[in-house]
Image (cartoon, helix red, strand yellow):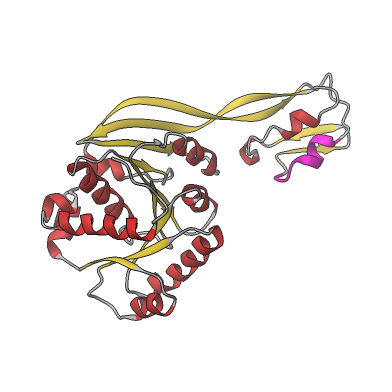
């Protein structure tokens, strides 16, 4: 089972839900994996307090043109949808930072003048903490495209047990790359005007992707009831409500999981998983 945890905006508690759910399942003896796909600013590892076993450099293949063989036909530029390679008069220009690594330009070149060279985009690190198998990606500083690194992180998804994906915030390409292919997407929001506005955008996204979904409302006892009313109106299941508990905030400031600072929440995160399973009856969950 693959559970994606996302949010329409940052700061709603997405990482809090993902890390505590993963640790809750591990404490019950379930096989669980946590993948932090928020590669621009991964932070799940700060709460798991783990040591990394392996680190792997991830590269993207980008075109390199042999000027002696190139005839300037322009077919490479015609096939590239992102203008990563263009032909101006008889000169071919490449822009590696725009390249998505599809390899189309080298395939259509009639002279075989285009080869591919690796361009480093980030790293993947793996580790384990208290039964949670963990993977995250760290995007190279200055790199503009995160989806290729997110795809590499998702290649580590295990076919056994439960895999939890901590997605980037928002509804743009990196988020779509992170959540697509999941069995369910849990959207974490807060009862504020911004929270509601971005939740509506996120709901439109998961519906367009055809993903089963539910909502977790963080700090549910503050603000107004407009988020709850919206979920009821749209028949969106609210799978968990987390109150504005000072103990949670104090624990968070110390880098603690909710399960560590407020142990009675283990039962509530267990109930969250049961609610998630109920929304995905076609998925068989194996320990």
Which residue is painted at 42% across and 34% down in the image?
Answer: 156
Question: Quadrant where the C terminus lies?
Answer: top left
User: Can residue 88 be seen in this snapshot?
Assistant: yes
Q: Residue furthest top?
A: 68
Q: Is residue 27 left or right of residue 39?
A: left
Q: Position of residue 90 (x, y in %)?
A: 88, 32
Snapshot quadrant of residue 265: bottom left
| Along the viewing direction, whichever of 163 and 200 lies nearer the viewer | 163
Q: Is residue 199 left or right of residue 17?
A: right
Which residue is painted at 53% across and 43% down in the image?
Answer: 147
| Along the viewing direction, whichever of 33 and 287 lies nearer the viewer | 287
Q: Position of residue 259 (x, y in %)?
A: 16, 51
Q: Position of residue 280 (x, y in %)?
A: 39, 56
| Along the viewing direction, whichever of 132 and 147 lies nearer the viewer | 132
Quick check: is 252 in the magenta stretch? no
Which residue is painted at 54% across and 58% down in the image?
Answer: 209
Q: Is residue 115 above or below residue 171?
A: above
Snapshot quadrant of residue 279: bottom left
- Report the span colored magenta: 74-82
Count of labels in the image: 0
Q: Position of residue 168 (x, y in %)?
A: 43, 51
């Amino acid at each position: 089972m693959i559970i994606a945890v996302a949010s329409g905006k940052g700061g709603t508690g997405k990482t809090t839900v993902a890390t505590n759910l993963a640790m809750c399942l591990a404490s019950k003896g379930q096989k669980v994996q946590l993948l932090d796909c928020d590669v621009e600013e991964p932070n799940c590892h700060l709460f798991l307090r783990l040591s990394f076993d392996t680190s792997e450099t991830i590269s993207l293949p980008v075109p390199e043109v042999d000027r002696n063989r190139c005839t300037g036909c322009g077919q490479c530029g015609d096939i590239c949808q992102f203008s990563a390679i263009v032909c101006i008069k008889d000169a071919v220009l490449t822009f590696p930072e725009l390249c998505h690594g599809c390899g189309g330009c080298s395939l259509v070149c009639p002279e075989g003048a285009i080869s591919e060279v690796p361009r480093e985009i980030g790293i993947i690190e793996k580790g384990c903490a208290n039964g949670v198998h963990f993977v995250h990606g760290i995007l190279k500083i200055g790199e503009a495209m995160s989806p290729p690194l997110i795809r590499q992180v998702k290649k580590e998804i295990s076919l056994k047990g439960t895999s939890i994906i901590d997605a980037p915030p928002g509804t743009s390409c990196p988020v779509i790359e992170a959540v697509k292919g999941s069995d369910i997407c849990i959207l974490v929001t807060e009862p504020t005007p911004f929270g509601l506005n971005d939740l509506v955008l996120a709901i439109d996204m998961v519906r367009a992707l055809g993903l089963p979904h539910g909502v977790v409302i963080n700090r549910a006892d503050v603000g107004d009831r407009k988020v709850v009313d919206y979920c009821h109106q749209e028949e969106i299941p609210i799978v968990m409500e987390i109150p504005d508990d000072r103990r949670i905030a104090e624990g968070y400031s110390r880098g603690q999981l909710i399960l560590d600072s407020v142990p009675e929440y283990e039962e509530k995160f267990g109930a969250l998983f049961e609610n998630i399973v109920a929304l995905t009856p076609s998925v068989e969950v194996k320990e």
